[in-house]
Each structure stands twice: as structure tokens, then as C-alpha cells.
Image: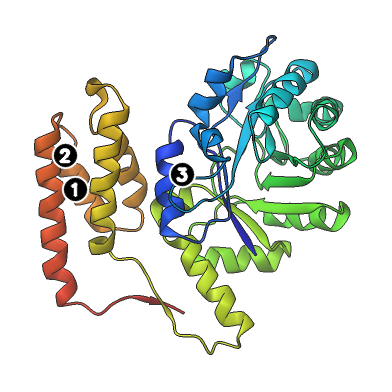
Amino acid sequence: MRILLAPMEGVVDAIMRDLLCAIGGIDVCVTEFIRINDHLLPDKVFYKRCPELLNNSLTSQSKTPVRVQLLGGKPIPIAENAASVAALGASAIDLNFGCPAKTVNKSDGGACLLKDPNRVHDIISATRKAVPQHIPVTAKIRLGFDDRSQYLENALAAYEAGANELTVHARSKADGYKPPAYWEYIAEIRETIPITVIANGDIWSLDDLKRCHKVTGCTDFMLGRGLLSCPDLALQIRAWHQQDSNNNTEKAYEAMRWYDLCPLLLQFFNITVEAYPPKYIGNRLKQWLFYLSRQYPEATDLFENIKRLKDRDSITQALNKSLQQSSVAQQSCPTASVA
């Protein structure tokens, strides 16, 4: 079983990838998309989006492999840029056919390409031919654009074009991110094409993962918002899988508490302060707290305390106060475990 960290534009950058992978349980990361138009991009663009290229395409702490994702609608420019980034040491090239953003789709990228499976085929085929065979070329699709009627055509197009793996977000572009995810379509895709199919969509918890596994039959899963809201979800899945393999003889996994998470929030805040312009101070932390609030009530409280703060000292004090409060609270509460 593999767990992949999903690319999320403006959210899962190299800092977030490194931190989440260091918590553990993640096998592969994918970068935010790099938009390809008509020309060959300079190396500095690839290094900016994927600084892990300077570290053998591995995250710095956990040494987790990172794939570079490209987005665009023209086969030749994408293939040429894929060859360029492969020469820089990319561990794999991922092609984006899933982004539902209107600005992306209007610019002939992302999910809009699913309206014509031949275009999906041609982009993947050109990339596969341009990239050395030892470097995987993977793709991510949705179930369609306006509806889900072409899910199998697009999956077959990806396979026939030479994709090594296919990630399927179990919604169409029109479905957006509204629940439910239609995992049953992934099951049919997995049964039809003889390459690894990675299930994606609405996996927020271990119970969701179990249901997705049962419905799809997949053993590989891509998590995005679920990992941002529950940073040790991959570890919970690992523990469950290990227990299942050992007939439930292993000790139950102890889920991450707010007390455990606070130091990571402080670390994340300090790194982002140095990485982004002063006018954005605290923005990335507040963004992450939005996701964490789904799992941790304390995240909502902390967000309310810092949402108007714009200086480093005040935000640091609020983080330390939350840590102190959680330290007191956790001494009087039993540790949560995941069966």
C-alpha cells in the first residue's frame, strides 16, 4: 500500500511537503503544477517549484521522492519541458488533467482536456517518448468535465499513450469538490486498465480510506485535504494496514494530539516567515489552520486569536500559549488511539 501526497496549488509547496513527509507515512509527493505554454522554461522555474531537484528529487528530512507536475494543452511544448526537467533529475513526470479551476481551464489546461480523450492521449504519448524510459510518466484525471460519461475513455487514453500510473479523482469538473466522491468509477477503471490506478477524493479519515479500499480495490491512494486536516493520517493508515496484515496483533496507533502538533505549527510558521515577503506574514499558517479546524477544535481557537495579527512576535506568543494550554489539557485526558 502506498500513500501519495496530492499537489494542491498555493498550499502544498516544498515547505509543506517536507513537513508532512517528516511526520511520516507518505511514499511519494507531487509538486504544484508548472504551467507550460509554447516555450521551453528556464531551469530556475523548475527549481523554484521543485527545489527538491537539488536534492536528488527528495524531500530534505524524510527523503521522500517528489514528482514534478506539468500542466498545459500542447503536446510538443509539454514533452520538451518534460525532457528538460527530467535532465535536471526529476524522479517522475506527472501530467495534470484534473485541475478544475476556471482560470486554468480557460487557458487550455487541466480538466478541460478531458472533453477530448485524444488530446489526453497525445500529450501523454509525446511526453512518454521525450522522457527516458527509466523515468515514470504519470497522469492525474477527473471522471470528466461537464459530466462523468467519458471516464473510461480518458483512462484508456492515458494507458494506451504509455502512462505508467494513473491517479483518478473520483469527481468530474462539474462536481467540483462537493461530496460524495464516486469511487465506484475508479473500481471499473482499475479493472479495465493494467497499470496502477491511484484512488483520490474524499479520503478524510481512516474509515474513509477503508471504504475507498473496499469500493475501488485500490492499494494506492492520493491524499490532499485529508492530510492537511489530519497530518498523521498516513501513519494511521500504515498502522491499520500493518495490523490487518498481522491479524490485529499489533498495538493500536496513538493519534497525533494538538499538543504534538503545536511545535510543528511553530516550526512551519518560522520557516514561512523567512520564505515569503513580510506582507504575507502568518498567511500560510492561517491557511493551514483552516484545514486543521476540521480535525482539531483548538485550530479554530488559534485561528481566531491570530487572524488579525501581522507581526511575528504576537503570532509566536499565540502559538506558545496554545501549546501551554494543550499541555495542561493533555495531562488530564486519555491518549486517543486508532484501531
Secondary structure of residue under mark 3: helix
Secondary structure of residue under mark 2: helix
Contact? badges 2 and 1 (CB < 8 Å): yes
Q: Residue at x 59, y 14 (%)?
A: 42
Q: Position of residue 169 (x, y in %)?
A: 65, 45
Q: Nearer the viewer, mark 3 or mark 2?
A: 3
Residue 31, by quadrant, is top right
Secondary structure of residue under mark 1: helix
- State the quadrant of the N terminus: bottom right
Q: Residue at x 90, y 39 (%)?
A: 160
Between 199 and 51, which is closer to the camera in this rendering? Answer: 51
- Look at mark 1 in the image and give the residue it sits on: 302
Q: Amino acid at mark 2?
A: Ile
Q: Nearer the viewer, mark 1 or mark 3?
A: 3
Between 92 and 100, which is closer to the camera in this rendering? Answer: 92
User: On the rendered structure, is 7 left or right of 318?
Assistant: right
Q: Residue at x 51, y 61 (%)?
A: 25
Q: Is residue 127 visible?
A: yes
Tally of numbered tags = 3
Q: Is residue 174 visible?
A: no
Pick whichever of labels 3 and 2 is earlier in the sequence.
Answer: 3
- Look at mark 2 in the image and give the residue it sits on: 306
Residue 56, by quadrant, is top right
Q: Position of residue 114 (x, y in %)?
A: 75, 30
Q: Amino acid at mark 1?
A: Leu
Residue 274, by quadrant, is top left
Q: Position of residue 237 (x, y in %)?
A: 53, 67
Q: Amino acid at mark 3?
A: Arg
- Look at mark 3 in the image and give the residue it sits on: 17
Mark 2 surroundings: few (<14), some (14-19) or many (≥20) residues within 10 A: some
Mark 3 surroundings: few (<14), some (14-19) or many (≥20) residues within 10 A: many
